[in-house]
Amino acid sequence: MKKFQIFRYIKNLRYLILIVTLLGGALIYVYANQHQEYTAQTVIQYSNPTANEGIAPDGSAIDPKEIYSAGVITDVISDLGLSLNVDQIRSACRVEEVISEDEQKRKDAILSDGEVYNEFTPVYKITFTADAKASKGYVRNVLDSIVKNYFVFYSKKYIDSAVIPNNTLNITADKYDYVNCVEIMENSVNDIIAFLEQKQQFYADFRSARTGYTFNDLENQYRYVEENIIPEYYAAVLGGKLTQNKEELIKTYQNRRDNCIMEISNLTDHIAKERTLIDQFGDKVTQSESQVAGAIGDNTDAIIEDVEEHWNREGFNADTTYDDLIDNYVNLRSDKNKKEIELAFCEKILSIYNDSAVVDKVGTPEVTELMDELNVMIEKLNVMYDAVEKTANELNEYSGARNISTLSGTYVEEAINVNLYIAMALLLFFIIGCAGAILIGRGVDFWQYLLYTDKKTGTANRVKCDMVIDEYSKRLLDENFSCIVFKLNTLQSTNVSKGRDFGDTMLKSFGKILDVEVKNYGFVGYNNGNMFISLFENFSKERAESFVEVIRQETENLHSNLEFSYGIANAADDNVYEVRELLKNAIKRLSN
C-alpha cells in the first residue's frame, strides 16, 4: 500500500477542498446576513440648570420616554418618507439611563431594601435596532431623525411655543366675501408679527442657517405688508364697495356687532368687580402690615421671617395674589379694547354697505383684478410663512440643543461581524476540506490496495493490468510508446532450493525495485507467471534499453541470486500501434 502522504492527498483533492471552503463560506455568509441586526446608538444629556433634579426649563418633570413618543416618531416618518407605522419604529427604540457603577450599586441597594430610588439621571442612551432587511445608513438616519425631532418637540413643549398657523391658506373667494378675505389676511399678518416680535425680543441675535433670516428681517417683511399692501386692499374693497352678497355681508357684520356689544358689556362688569377686589385687597394688606409693625416695634428685620411664615401658614400670599389680580385686570382691559376696535370696524362696514346704492359685484373687471392681486399676495405670504416656519423650527432645534446635548455621535453596531464570521468559516471549512481530503485519499489508498495491489510484489495486480491495457486499447499508441516485460528466471529454482518464503521475498524485492523506478515514468504490474509488464508513453527504444540497465544494477546490488529476462517492444520500431499486439511482441522477445 502507498505511504501515508498528507500533501499528496491535499494536492490530488485540492479542487474539492476549494469547493468545500467556498461553499462553507457562502453558507455562513447567507446565515449571518439572514440573522444580522443593526443597532444605532447615541448618548444625550439634559443640560438645563434643573436637569439633575428631573425638572424641565418650564418647571415640569422631564420624561425621557417622550423621546420615542408618537408625535416624535410621526415627524420622523414624515422626514424620511417611511412606509412604516409608528408602532413599528417605537418597538425598535430603547432609552436607557446611563449611571456610574457606584451609583448603580447604590440604586440596587436602595431597591433591594424596598425603598424608592428618587434620583434622576440626566444622561440617557438611545438605541434603534433594525433587522437584516435594513442597512447601516437606514438605522443611522432614523436615530438621527429621532434625536433631531425630539429636540424640536422638547423645545416646543418646555421652552418655546409652536409656530403660529398660517391662516392665509384658507382665503378663497368661494368661501368669503372680499372684505372678509382682506380682514383674514390682516389678522393672520398681525398674529405673525406679534409672534415675530416675541421671538425678536428674546432671540435678537439668532439668524437661521437654513433661510438666512433673523426674526427682525421677517418682521420687517410682514410690517411692509401690514402698512402698505393691506391698506391698499381695504381701499379697493371698501372704496369700490365690492361684495359678492350684500345682504349676507350686512347680516354677518350685524351679528358680529351685536356680539361685540354684549361682550363689551360683560367685560365692563368684570373689570369693575376686579377693580373693587384690587382696592379692597390693597386696604387689607396695608392694615395687616400696620398691625404687624405696631406689634413688633422697630425690630421688623429680626422677625420678618416669622411674619412670612405666619402668612404662608394661613394660606395668604399677598404678593402672588395681588399680582394675579393685576394681571387679570390688565387682560380684561386688553380684551375690552380689542372688542371696541372690532365693534368700530363692524360699524364702519355696516355704514358703507347699508347704502341702498350698493349692489353685488361678481365677475366685474375691478373684482377680477382684485382677486388676482390677492392670489398673488397669498402665494407671497405662503413663501414668507415658509421662511418663518423654517426659522422658528431651527430656533426650536437650537433651543432644544442648548438644553439637551449629545455626548456621542451616532454610530452603528452589527449584531454579527459578517467579515469575521466569513474569515472564520473559510478557515474552518478549509481545515474540514483538508481533513476530508486526507480521509478520502487514504481511503482510496486502502481501496486500491485491497482491489488492485498484488500482495506478494506490492505492484498492481492482474486486474489492474487488464484495466490499464483495456484503457490503452481504446486508442492508437504514440510512436514513443514502449512496453517492457520482465520475467524472473530463478524464482522456481529458488522456491525449490530455499523454500517458497525465500522466493516470495525475492519476488517482493524485485517488485519494489520496479515500482520505485517505474512510477515516475509509467505503469508496472504483476501479470502472474513470474512476469511483470511495464508501459511507458514517452520512451524510445534506446531509453527503454537504458532503463533495463538501471533495473539490472539495482537488482544486482540488492540480491545476488535474482536473475531476470526482459523483452522490449516500441511502437515506431515495430510499426505496431495497438497495445495488446505490442505486448505480444515484447513477450516474444524475452531473453536473458
Image (tube, rainbow, N blue to C red):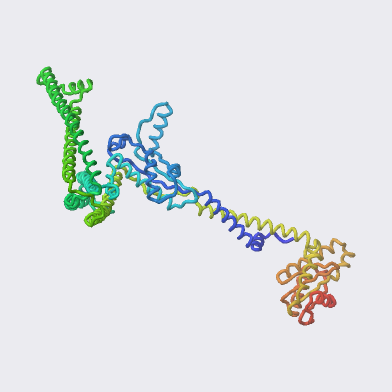
Query: Measured along the vertical axis of the image, is residue 83 above or below residue 540?
Result: above
Residue 512 position, x and y percent, is 76, 66
Q: State the residue in front, 257 or 536.
A: 257
- 311 relative to 490 in the view: left or right: left
Q: Quadrant of residue 337?
A: top left
Check the picture and name the quadrant holding the C terminus.
bottom right
Does residue 352 sit above or below 556 in this rendering? above
Confirm whether residue 174 shows in the render.
yes
In front of the other: 99 or 513: 99
Residue 379 image position (x, y, % from top left): 27, 54
Give residue 364's quadrant in the image.
bottom left
Q: x, y (%) of residue 80?
A: 39, 51
Q: Which of 546 and 343 is in front in this view?
A: 343
Could you tell me residue 367's position as x and y percent? 23, 54
Q: Residue at x 33, y 44 (%)?
A: 151
User: Which image quarter is the N terminus in?
Assistant: bottom right
Above or below residue 563? Residue 345 is above
Front-most of residues 88 and 65: 88
Number of residue marks: 0
Q: Does residue 211 show up?
A: no
Residue at the front extreme of this rendering: 356
87 to the left or right of 178: right
Residue placed furthest toward the top: 295
Does residue 73 appear to the left or right of 382 in the view shown? right
Q: Determine which quarter of the picture holds residue 100.
A: top left
